Image (cartoon, rainbow, N blue to C red):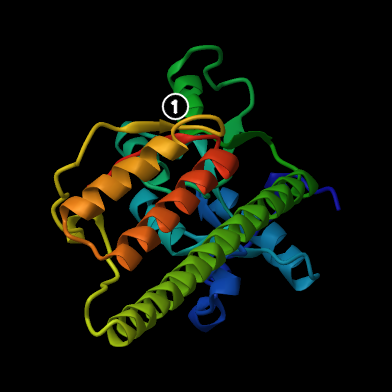
Amino acid sequence: MKTDASALKTDASALKTDASALSDEAALKRRVLILTPTGRDAALAGEALAGEALAGAGLLAEVCADMEALCREMAAGAAGALIASEALIPASLRLLQEALAQQPPWSDLPVIILTSGGREPSGKGPLAEALDALGNTTLLERPLRVATLVHAAQSALGARRRQYEVRDHLEEHLRLEEKLQVEYQKQRILLRDVLASVTGGRLHLCDSLADLPAPLPTAGEAIPLSRTAGLGELRHAAKRAALAEGFADDRWQDLITAASEAAMNAAVHAGGGEGRVY
């Protein structure tokens, strides 16, 4: 279908989309928001998009009265925006830039700009600079063919659909993280209660460094540990400290065995470290 814009005459009131049809998120995400100061542009866009929607292309048209309304609808959900260049007066442009700047990280709303052939500023003119600031924009020059408009709108819909998919994946990831955090906290509470029960309250599960008791004074300097050095010195230091505290023979021997095994694990499996006796 190839029809010039001047050949299309559609009552703008017919573009009023039934609010109930847009109540669900799926419909909101398929809308193309239209802002054109002249009724003929709105009629062209509405007929083209509404016709394609009925044909199964999945596009819905929503005509906005002004830039404030367009920005409000954009926040609710949309596949893209179709704006005539003459609507980008400084005040409206600032509203649009602010709305686009407030998009979440996953969002980059496609914006289609209808320009007037041969009369629009080029290079570094005001409109060109404004379009650069908007970001994800596509220029369509008038007079406009319906097929061109529909193709641009469908491309915007495809790009926007992928953005919504990214959003859904991010939200699902956050939901899973929250669920895992809840389960983790439940496990910690269970472990804390079991640990306190089986040890008669002598051992506690600490949730942070702030929960740890104040460190004890060391009984000597740090002892470097490796596969070939430090193990015997740590055993002797542990024995001296245990005897100084009056440990019975079986207790200081158990302490030396535990210290020796811990030091060996550090040397063999962690490549070494330091041993301290408190």
Residue at figure coordinates x 52%, y 70% from the top left: 176
Residue in front for this viewpoint, 143 or 21: 21
Which residue type does callout 1 highlight?
Ala
Residue 101 screen position, x and y as percent: 39, 41
Which residue: 42% across, 70% down? 181
User: Residue sitting at 48 percent across and 71 percent down?
Assistant: 180
Residue 162 versus residue 110: which sits nearer the camera?
A: 162
Comparing 205 with 241, the one in front is 241
Q: At 31% from the left edge and 59% from the top edge, which residue is drawn?
A: 252
The residue sitting at the top extreme is 123
Q: Is mark 1 on a helix, strand or loop?
A: helix
Q: Can residue 70 be seen in this view?
A: no
Characterize the local packing of mark 1: few (<14), some (14-19) or many (20 or more) Cα atoms within 10 angstroms: some
In this rendering, position of residue 232 left or right of residue 192: right
Q: In which quarter of the image is residue 31?
A: bottom right
* Residue 228 quadrant: top right
The picture places residue 171, in percent across and down from the top left corner, at 51, 64
Q: In this view, does 183 lie to the left or right of 47?
A: left
Residue 60: tell me if it is visible. Answer: yes
Residue lying farthest right? 1
Q: In this view, does 235 lie above or below 202?
A: above
Q: Percent position (x, y) of residue 276?
A: 30, 41
| Coordinates of residue 275 in the picture (x, y in percent) | 36, 40
Tally of numbered discs: 1
User: Between 278 and 113, which is closer to the camera in this rendering?
Assistant: 278
Above or below 203: residue 97: above
Q: Mark 1 highlights which residue? A: 130
- Relative to 207, 31 lies left or right: right
